[in-house]
Image (cartoon, rainbow, N blue to C red):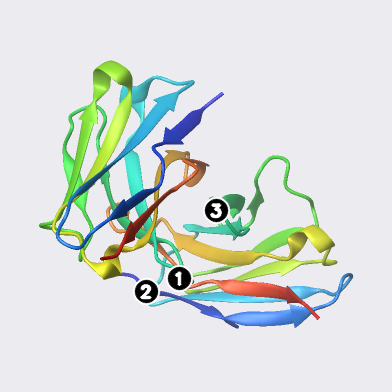
Amino acid sequence: QVQLVQSGSELKKPGASVKVSCKASGYTFSNYAINWVRQAPGQGPEWMGWISTDTGNPTYAQGFTGRFVFSLDTSVSTAYLQISSLKAEDTAVYYCARAGGSRWPYWGQGTLVTVSS
Amino acid sequence: DIQMTQSPSSLSASVGDRVTITCRASQSISGHLNWYQQKPGKAPKVLIYDVSTLESGVPSRFSGSGSGTDFTLTIGSLQPEDFATYYCQQTYNTNTWSFGQGTKVEIK
């Protein structure tokens, strides 16, 4: 069965960087893009962008350019989200998600990133 | 970008009640509208896709309707396990997917 397993919670200081991983299994990794979604406390999901697992080409949503980088390690079927120069407002749960047809039935369990001094 | 606006932002209802949640898009999205349910500490779960198609395993008390810019999620008879937050998602613009801000369904 399709699974997306993310790395564990992170506590970081402002200005630091964080890298969240999303390991896929149960399907051919290169056949489906990986989306990244941010959910700030008490807020709805916010699409951050996606990365083609075929070409490695990332697409970033408005508001997620500059400090946010999507990458892959196809040898281990894993996608990464790196956020640099962390700010308090980056505190959120970050999800990876994969489409199935026109909807997103496959989600990671989420990674809580807390930015606090 | 397409903005998705849900109403109400929260509601209180009793077990057995019929509940309706509305989602409005800032422009026509044809039939590219999905609904998700999210419980605390969990990822969103697909309930309905393409406006009205029930995801496998989802109870038939959930239904969706609408077209163009206005869409509705209906829970026919609210059950205890339905208390959660519901989000709509547009998939019309394939490079700018967006979600509504959510509707929290609470116990009256």
Identified at 53% across, 71% down, the residue is B102
Tell me the subunit letter for badge 2: B
Tell me the subunit letter for badge 1: A
What's the amino acid at mark 2?
Answer: Gln
Q: Give the number of the disc on residue B3.
A: 2
Left or right: A70 as drawn, with respect to B81: left
What's the amino acid at mark 1?
Answer: Gln
* Secondary structure state at the residue bearing disc 2: loop
Number of other residues with Cα within 10 Å of mark 1, as a class: few under 14, some 14 to 19, many 20 or more:
few
Identified at 72% across, 68% down, the residue is B74
Q: Nearer the viewer, mark 1 or mark 3?
A: 1
Number of other residues with Cα within 10 Å of mark 2, as a class: few under 14, some 14 to 19, many 20 or more:
some
**Compared to B23, does B81 lie above or below?**
above
Number of other residues with Cα within 10 Å of mark 3, as a class: few under 14, some 14 to 19, many 20 or more:
many
Identified at 75% across, 74% down, the residue is B19
Tell me the subunit letter for badge 3: B
Q: Give the number of the disc on residue B44.
A: 3
Q: Give the number of the disc on residue A43.
A: 1
Identified at 45% across, 47% down, the residue is A110
